[in-house]
Image: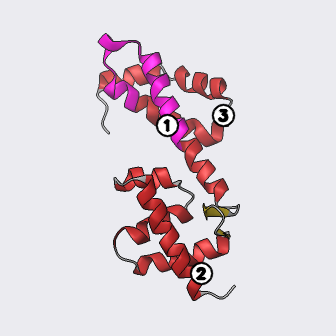
Amino acid sequence: MRLTDEQRIIVTENHKLIYWMINRKHLEMAEYYDLLALELCYAVAKHDPSRGSLANYYKLRCEGVLYKEYRKSQAQKRLHTNVTLIDNVHTINNNDLQRMAELSEWMNGDDGIILQMKSEGYSQTEIGNHLGVSQSYVSKILKRLKKEFYEEVDY
C-alpha cells in the first residue's frame, strides 16, 4: 500500500493511537506493535472524515484485526487438546487428526480442504463459511471421513 505525503503526515501525527490501543487492550508491545502500526496506515488510507473521527475508525479496524488474531491463537490452542468431531462416536486425538490431515493432500474436492482446516483447529461453522457450504454438510463429510479412517486403522 502506498500512502501519499499527506497521509504519511497524518500517520505520524496519530502515531500515539498505536500505544493507546496497546494499553487499552493490555497487549504485549513487541508482539502487536507492527500489526497495529500497519493497521493505522490502512485506517488513514481508507478513512472518510465525513463518517467520523480517525481515532474511532482506527479503533474499529483494530478490534476486527485483534479478534482475528485471537481466533487464530484459539485455533492453535485447540490443536493441543483432543478434538471431538461427532459426539458419542470417537474422540480423535491430535496424532490421528494429524495423520488424517496428511492424507488430505490426496483427497479430491472439499474432503481434503475440510480435513485440513479441521486439523488446523477451525470449527465446522468456520469451515462451512470458508467453503460456502452449511455446517451440517461439513459435519457429514467429517463423519464419513472419520468412519473410513477408523475402519482402516485397528484400535
> Disc number at residue 65?
1
79 and 41: which is toward the camera: 79
Provide the secondary structure element on which disc 2 rests. helix
Residue 101 visible: no
Q: Main secondary structure of the magenta part?
A: helix
Q: Which residue is mark 3?
A: 27
Q: Of callouts 3 and 2, which one flags the residue occurring earlier in the amino acid sequence?
A: 3
The amino acid on which the numbered mark 3 sits, given as a three-letter code, is Leu
Real-space CA distance between mark 2 and mark 1, rounded to the nearest whole angstrom? 39 Å
Kindly identify the residue that appears in the image at 50 percent across and 30 percent down: 62
Residue 145 shown left or right of residue 137 in the figure: right
Q: Which residue is mark 2?
A: 150
Q: Nearer the viewer, mark 3 or mark 1?
A: 1
Residue 153 visible: yes
Quarter occupied by residue 77: bottom right
Rendering coords of residue 106 (x, y %): 41, 81
In this picture, is 3 found above or below 53? below
23 and 7: which is toward the camera: 23
> Which residues, given as a range, are shown in magenta?
42-68
Quarter occupied by residue 48: top left
Q: Of callouts 3 and 1, which one flags the residue occurring earlier in the amino acid sequence?
A: 3
Rendering coords of residue 59 (x, y %): 50, 23
In this picture, is 88 found above or below 122? below
